[in-house]
Every structure is written in C-alpha cells, then in structure tokens.
Image: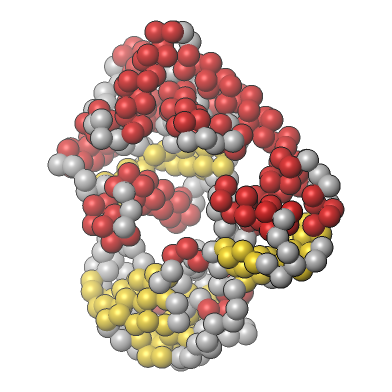
Amino acid sequence: MAELFSYHLIAPGDRVLCAVSGGADSMYLLCRLLDGASRGGYQVGAAHFHHGIREASDGEEDFVRAWCERHQVPLHVGHGDVPAAAAQRGQGVEETARALRYAFLYDTARREGYTLIATGHHAGDQAETVLMHLIRGSGLQGLRGIQPRQGMLIRPMLEVTRDQVEDYLRRRHVPHVEDESNADPAYTRNRMRHQVLPLLGELNPQAVHHIAQAAAKLREDAQLLDTLAQAVPGVTEGPEGVAVDISQLLSQPRPLVMRRLAQALTGLHIHPSQVYLDGLYGLMAQAQSGARLDLPGYVARKSWNQMKITPVGEAPPLCSVPLWDGDTLWGEWRVECRTAVCPQENREGLWLVPGDYVLRPREVGDTLQLPKRPTKTVKKLMIEKKIPSHLRPRLPVVAQGERVAAVALLGVDQAFLAQPGQPARSINVTKENEDHA
C-alpha cells in the first residue's frame, strides 16, 4: 500500500488492529493491510463494534465474522447500546457511537497487545472534515483536517479516493456491506458527502483530492507553528497548573500567543475552545489585577504582570465507606455497584470477584497489578495514564482490607479480576460533573 508506507506509519514488529465495520472503506483497509503484512513484517487483527442502533447491525457482524474466519484473521467483537448510552449522557447518537467505538478499540488494543489502531478514513472523509471546519469558522487547527497519526491511531488512507476504494474491491472481488445510515440526510456529514462534494466535483473533478492536499500542506504549517509556539517565553507548566509572565508572552505575535495558550490548556486536559482562548487573552491584555476566568476544573487569575491557572479550591475531604449494591455518591463521583454474572465480552466498568469492599482515597504506598503488567504504585500509574493532578487525590479506590482491588480510570488488580461466566461485583464510576473529568 504505497500511501501507507509513504507515511511510515507501520514498522516491522508492529501489531495493527484494523477497525472493520464491513463497509467498503474498512474492507479496503483490511485487505491492503493484509497485502503488506508479510513484506512489512507486521501482524494484523480486526475489530468490529456492534452499535445496537440498526437491525442490519447483526448481519454486518455476521458478515465480518465469516470473512475473517475464512481468511484466518483474528477478530475481536464488542457490543454497545448506543441509543441508551446517548440518552443517559445527553449526547447525540453520532457522538456517542464514536465515543463507544473508540473506547472499544483502545481497550481491545491495550488488552490484546496491539501497537497500532488503523481506521479507514479516506480522501473524501478528509475533504468533508475540512469543509465542516471551514463553515464553522475554524482556524488552522481545524483546517488541517484529520491527522495521519495520533498516538497509536493511524489513518493510512487519507490520500486514497472513494473511487480508488471501489475500483480495488471490484478488481479483487472483495465483498462488503452497505451502511444505510450513510445515506441518511438527517446527518450533516451525509449532506456534505452527497450534496456539497458532488457539486464541487462538477466545478473541478479533482476537488476532493485538492482539498486533501491542502489539508496536508496546512498540517505542515501547523506543525511548524506548534514548534515555534512551544519555544515562546513566559509560560511555565508544572504539576499544579500554569504560570504566565504576561508582558513576556504578549510581546509575541498573537497567533503564537493563542497557540501557546492552547498547548497549556491541552496539558491540563482542558479542550482549548476559542471561547477559553479569547477569555485568557482578554484576561491578560485588558482585565485589571485580581480578575479571574473559570475553566473546567481550574481557575485563571491575573495578578499584576502574572496570570496563574490553578486547580479549583480544595474540596471537602473524602472518607472510607463500605461499598454496597446500589448508587453511592462519594465526593464528586457516583459509584454504581451491583452483583451480576461477569459477561464474556463488552465488560464496561470494573468487574471484581465477589467480596466485601470499601471506597477510599488513594494512600501513600498503594500498589496495583493490572492484568499482564508488573506491579506499580497507583501514583505512577496515574501519571502514566496522564490523569490530571487535581483529580488524583480524589479518584475512587476500591479496597479490601489493606489491598487495593481496583482504581477508577485505571482498572482492576489481577488478583481481584472476575472471570467471564462467574458471579462478580460490577462497579461503574462516573463523575457528577463530566466537564471536570
């Protein structure tokens, strides 16, 4: 796959988990990955997520299972109830489906030892994304479109057009399923795909390709600006927040200032929305000393020539409480506990062997041995997981006696991990104010 290897996205020894819906794009990606596996010295597995949205989903899962079995491709399947999850979260179906799907992909990759996750975004998807950002008034960050690589996530098809996908499948006689939702005009992206892009294609047959090329060029510009912004003086990032020397930072061009602020917010796990960036710039440039700006989990305060972004004030101390079946409000966390049989797949939340447990804060010296991993201190695992420092002292720890059985956002200790088909304690932890999580 020339496009894939030109990005140098896969190295010998990698294990690639390919997201497969059964549609044309994902079948093309899976076949192309398999084509190059022997030559590239990497391994390929497939992952399929059943969203529980449409009746056709059962047939799609059966199709993917049969194809992978016939071609001896390891397959991992997950199930979710997207409509129910969307209603519970107060989110749209599209947004919820994407969140559950990616959570499944990352969980599967970590559990099964995959080093990369590949998705089938192609040049048409890139063009749609760029145009969607453009009509929303996005800056360079959005106009650079979908990135070829983000951590372990790779998109090796961003320069492959839909016509090339269909031509390959036709020549190779590769079957695929049609997702009816891709034609539903209720989704904004579908209207962009079926109405706007064809019109642009009439004006210029290479429109999709040229938009993808433009995104690639803007990506290079954005990477340069990111590097320049990182070197801007006046910003100090630490475990307890961010300190800004206002006069030093404002001596730089505004685009670099805004990009450096965005980097600082991202480091605090705050989405750098334009509202927050404009607010911080105004706080530095115009507000009087003593002014403040509230951010998710943090507050920015101006004091003469300095601005500090620090965690919100101390919350009430947390104590140890027994963990019974039902809902427990523990600080800012809601902990749902029930007794159930551990499922074979799609084990959302924490599944522990039966027993008496307590909820408590983290203590000095707490350790946790996650499955197939060495024992580490809970503090070190939180740092590796990049859990914000202001959350760590208040993250729910499930303990039995002196031993840590599980930690929210980290997982279950190997010694307390429930086995599929056996009675278990199911624990689901959610934050009452998700903006701060």
Tell me where residue 63 sits by quadrant: top left
Residue at the extreme left: 55
- Horizontal arrangement in the rendering, residue 362 relative to residue 109 (left or right): right
Q: Residue at x 54, y 64 (%)?
A: 296
51, above or below 290, in the image = above
**Colour treatment of the image:** secondary structure
Q: Residue at x 35, y 71 (%)?
A: 428
Give the x, y percent position of residue 406.
45, 76
Residue in front for this viewpoint, 103 or 420: 103
414, above or below 25, in the image = below
26, above or below 151, in the image = above
Report the label total: 0
Give the x, y percent position of residue 396.
47, 78
96, above or below 341, in the image = above
Instruction: Look at the image and tell me whether residue 202 can be seen.
Output: yes
Q: Residue at x 74, y 54 (%)?
A: 285
Residue in front for this viewpoint, 12 or 236: 236
Q: Residue at x 57, y 57 (%)?
A: 270
Give the x, y percent position of residue 328.
34, 82
Residue in front for this viewpoint, 3 or 259: 259
- Horizontal arrangement in the rendering, residue 38 relative to residue 248 (left or right): left
